[in-house]
């Protein structure tokens, strides 16, 4: 049995990273854990997120994961340093892709759509200061978006209204680059594109996370050496959820 890579998010958002990860590392076994009993994380306090994610990481360690991917910007930007300090296995996180956005933006006006927790975090602010000091950054919390996506709603009228409300101020400020700074948002990328003028480019860093994961596996000598295809096992901490809108296989209930 190959030791799996554990991947977790507050809910289904982290699923947006799986295509890039499976494409780059098709032999790896993956465990995807959606903490839907405690979702959304975006407006929870840092201490509540830390306590909950410690429990999740304990669980992934019990499942013999060799590495943990924090498939959540809110968790990465707030508590990944504490998790790294507490657990001995390696971590890979995801945070808003400020550096590539600053490099790719022509007019140096960048929009960041993320949760309130991410936008208020020290790590996010440091990255913005370090990599985009020459840019104007228009930040907007995607209030309510995660709740709709978690219900499997990808196109209702209410969701469209919220997407438009989030994007409008950024479009009005003249952004030419939009960072999707929450892993849930790529799941409604086509809806976002409907409201976004064509010339605005969208930055979604799932491929950079997959590459970073590959580098970390090599660096720590943790890549699987077998050639048979890896399996993905899905768990949710909620008994009732809408993950089957996105996942075409059984999802195990994991009370936590
Ligand atoms: N998908 C998460 C992120 O990337 C968390 C969203 C939430 O639970 O509010 O930030």
Image (cartoon, rainbow, N blue to C red):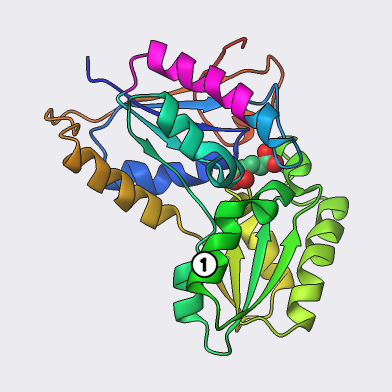
Position of residue 17 relative to residue 56, above or below, is: below
Q: Nearer the viewer, residue 70 or 197?
A: 70
Pick the residue in front: 87 or 17. 87
> Is residue 167 visible from the viewing direction of this image?
yes
Quadrant of the rendered image containing residue 173: bottom right
In percent of width and height, residue 169 lies at 81, 74
* Residue 242 x/y as whole percent: 68, 29
235 and 91: which is toward the camera? 91
**Direction from residue 248 to residue 175 in the image, left or right:** right
In the displayed structure image, the side of residue 109 where residue 166 appears, left or right: right
Say if 207 sits above or below 239 in the image.
Answer: below
Q: Is mark 1 within 8 Å of ligand 1?
A: no
Q: Residue at x 34, y 21 (%)?
A: 65
**Picture layout, residue 4 above or below residue 186:** above
- Magenta stretch: dominant secondary structure: helix
First to last magenta residue range? 50-65
Q: Residue furthest bottom?
A: 107
Residue at position x 55%, y 37% in the image = 79
According to the picture, the residue beneath numbered tag 1 turns out to be 98
Give the image location of residue 194, x and y in percent: 70, 69
Say which residue appears at 70% left-offset and 50% top-offset: 115
Number of labels in the image equals 1
Q: Going 55% across and 42% down the picture, which residue do you hit?
A: 72
The quarter of the picture where the N terminus appears is top left
């Amino acid at each position: 049995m190959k030791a799996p890579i554990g991947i977790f998010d507050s809910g289904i958002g982290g699923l947006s990273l799986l295509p890039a990860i499976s494409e780059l590392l098709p032999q790896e076994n993956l465990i995807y854990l959606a903490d839907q009993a405690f979702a959304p994380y975006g407006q929870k306090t840092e201490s509540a997120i830390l306590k909950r994610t410690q429990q999740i990481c304990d669980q992934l360690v019990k499942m013999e994961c060799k590495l943990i991917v924090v498939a959540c910007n809110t968790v990465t930007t707030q508590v990944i340093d504490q998790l790294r300090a507490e657990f001995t296995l390696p971590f890979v996180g995801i945070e808003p892709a400020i550096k590539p956005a600053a490099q790719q933006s022509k007019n140096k006006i960048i929009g960041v759509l993320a949760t309130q927790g991410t936008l208020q975090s020290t790590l996010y602010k440091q990255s913005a200061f370090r990599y985009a000091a020459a840019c104007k950054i228009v930040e907007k919390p995607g209030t309510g978006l995660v709740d709709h996506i978690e219900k499997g709603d990808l196109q209702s009228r209410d969701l469209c209204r919220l997407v438009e409300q989030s994007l409008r101020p950024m479009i009005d400020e003249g952004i030419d680059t939009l960072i999707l700074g929450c892993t849930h948002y790529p799941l409604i990328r086509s809806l976002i594109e409907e409201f976004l003028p064509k010339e605005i480019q969208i930055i979604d860093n799932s491929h950079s996370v997959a590459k970073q994961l590959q580098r970390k596996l090599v660096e720590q000598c943790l890549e699987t050496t077998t050639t048979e295809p890896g399996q993905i096992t899905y768990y949710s901490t909620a008994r009732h959820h809408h993950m089957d809108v996105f996942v075409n296989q059984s999802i195990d209930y994991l009370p936590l």
